[in-house]
Amino acid sequence: MTAETLPLRPDDRLVMVVGNYGSGKTEVSVNLAIRAAASGRHVRIADLDLVNPYFRCREARRLMEANGVRVVVPPGAQAWADLPIVVPEVLAMLSPPAGTLSLFDVGGDDVGARVLGSLRDGAIATGYGLWQVINPERPFTRDPDGCLAMREAIERSSRLSVTGIVVNAHLMEETTADTVLRGVDVAREVARRGRVPIRFVAVMEGLADDPRIRAVAEPVFSMKRHMLPPWLLPAGEERLPAGRPVPLGRRNGAHGTYRD
Amino acid sequence: MSKVLMKGNEALGEAAIRAGCVHFFGYPITPQTEIPEYLCKRLPEVGGVFLQAESEVAAIHMVYGAAGAGVRCMTSSSSPGISLMAEGMSYIAACELPCVVINMMRAGPGLGGILPAQSDYFQATRGHGHGDYQCIVLAPASVQEAVDLMTLAFDLAEKYRNPVMVCADGMIGQMMEPVEFRTEGRGPPMAENDWALTGCEGRPRRIVNSLHLAPEQNFACNVRLKEKYDRAAREEVRFEVYGDERPDLLVVAFGTMARISKSAIDDLRREGRRVGLFRPITLNPWPYARCRAAMDAMPVGAKVLDVEMSMGQMIYDVKLAAEGTRAIEFFGKAGGLVPSPDEVAERIRALLP
């Protein structure tokens, strides 16, 4: 499939991205938000990660806003508190107007998905996508059993049902085509046994052109890496004014920010 | 062994088990909570004990007890929680018991914030609790190094019968990196010894105690500890040098700040500048002689830049290493702000001729 495809259908209006810690939910969410906005959709993304203190999508807030995405996070310094804050706008996002995409970047594991329980009724009324991001390079989801156990735990705590699988097999900078293909194999088994479709296979842009990955039957979503540690920040990147966010990443094109 | 993608905190938890840790006592605090979270799942699987204490004060004293009973044990916390552990650490050091303490540093002082910092350097390297004692302090700069240092931490704790602190900033605890574990399964138990309280049936009783009312007796304890720390200073110094061997500017940095400095140094070397890095891995004992040797290898007039995620703490050790032979410049940010590679590079450029 062509790597330029944006793997969103017009009826994907309310999408919640879940999965275990380190599966890459945030990277997938940020990329989806930016690309959906570029395609002309109104996009709102809520950072619903209430369990992770760093590397949440709020760190890429300025980048997303510069790309026309509305980012819903706790106001001011509260964005940097380790408190489970859900702002009222999140509730409004449960009923997206026509042409609008509401994207929820949810925290890791069943613990992180618990917040969705409070949004359950609204999500069901609107119709939702609950996408489980799978990365078999992580300790507890190395095989289909682990992925299915994670799904069950997430469904139990969110009281919602997984509707699709996003394959995001990666080992950070050490990801190879083999890593991705191994992940696709695991995900296919999860999809078959769990009776949910694979929505797309997410890969970093450098790998999307690999012939073996182009040959994958499922849609391939080519991503840029936005969530980066400070030593990976691209050299010569435009400097932010003093007192403003510290740039987050290096060596991979577009940048995220460490704080806003 | 194949690599697995792990968050620093989880990797530290797994590494502790593979180093033989069977008892963990702790209390949650951001940004280290994934260590107890991981261990509460994993320790029961390997026949270990996980116990969430009612506070950090309780946790460190549980470690005191477990170490006294001769089991490989550990606690972890972040800056304010480590402050609470100061009293217990002093008792453990006084009683010459082995244990490992992880400090995943966050911004301070006070409650501060949850973002990364290196501002507990004074606390870690200068004893931190009361009395004449020290901790051996290891400072990893990556998740893999954190994993590798955990085995060393338990070994050193036992070799010196002293607390070993693994001192990292929150970035290392929170970031994901591929890691490789070099051993399988639960590590070895504590070696047979002649001090652990294991039940005195059939042998003379042993006493673990830090109360020495007679000054001569207390002084003897002080001297014994000092001899131990001197021995560690001779045998346990660890460091890394990076970049040019005869640089026009030497950066001294540890942990995450060293990693960021490497990116800056790479950029500057591509511009043809001669820049090097000296990275202490043991923050105590500090590699004074090796840092001094790196400075002595530099051309006359070459500069030294100490870079920290603090307002300047390790700089005093860099100055001790230089003994007045070089002027030591400083660049740092604190409060949870992390200097970027570009900022470090800019500061270096400004100092170079």
Image (spheres, coloured by chain):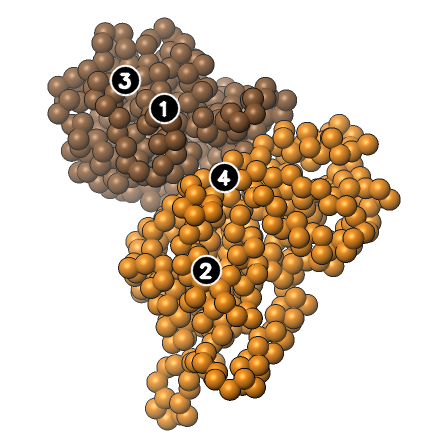
Chain colours: A brown, B orange
Labels 4 and 2 positioned on one and the same chain: yes
Q: Which mark is residue A29?
A: 1
In this rendering, the answer to whether A42 lies above or below A28 is above
> Left or right of B83: which side holds B298?
right
Q: Chain of mark 4?
A: B
Q: Nearer the viewer, mark 3 or mark 4?
A: 4
* Nearest to N terminus: mark 4 or mark 2: 2
SS under mark 2: strand
Which amino acid does the dot numbered 1 rest on? Ser
Q: Mark number for residue A102?
A: 3
Camera-near label (4 vs 1) is: 4
Disc 2 marks which residue? B101
Q: Which residue is rendered at x = 38% and y = 76% of the image?
A: B69
Q: Position of residue B295 (x, y in %)?
A: 78, 49
Residue B142 coordinates in the image, percent (x, y): 54, 45
Depth check: give the residue in front, A242 or B240: A242
**Distance CA(mark 4)–CA(mark 2):** 23 Å
Looking at the rendered structure, the kind of residue marked 3 is Ser
Amino acid type at circle 4 is Gly
- Quadrant position of the C terminus of chain A in the picture: top left
Report the residue at 40% width, 46% height from top.
Answer: B111
Rounded to the nearest angstrom, the CA distance separating label 2 from label 3 is 43 Å
Taking B72 as reference, is B158 left or right? right
* Disc 3 chain ID: A
**Residue A242 higher or lower than B234, as above or below:** above
Q: Which residue is mark 4?
A: B335
Relative placement, left or right, of A173 versus A21 is right
Query: In the image, are marks 1 and 2 on the same chain?
Result: no
Does B304 sit above or below residue B63? Answer: above
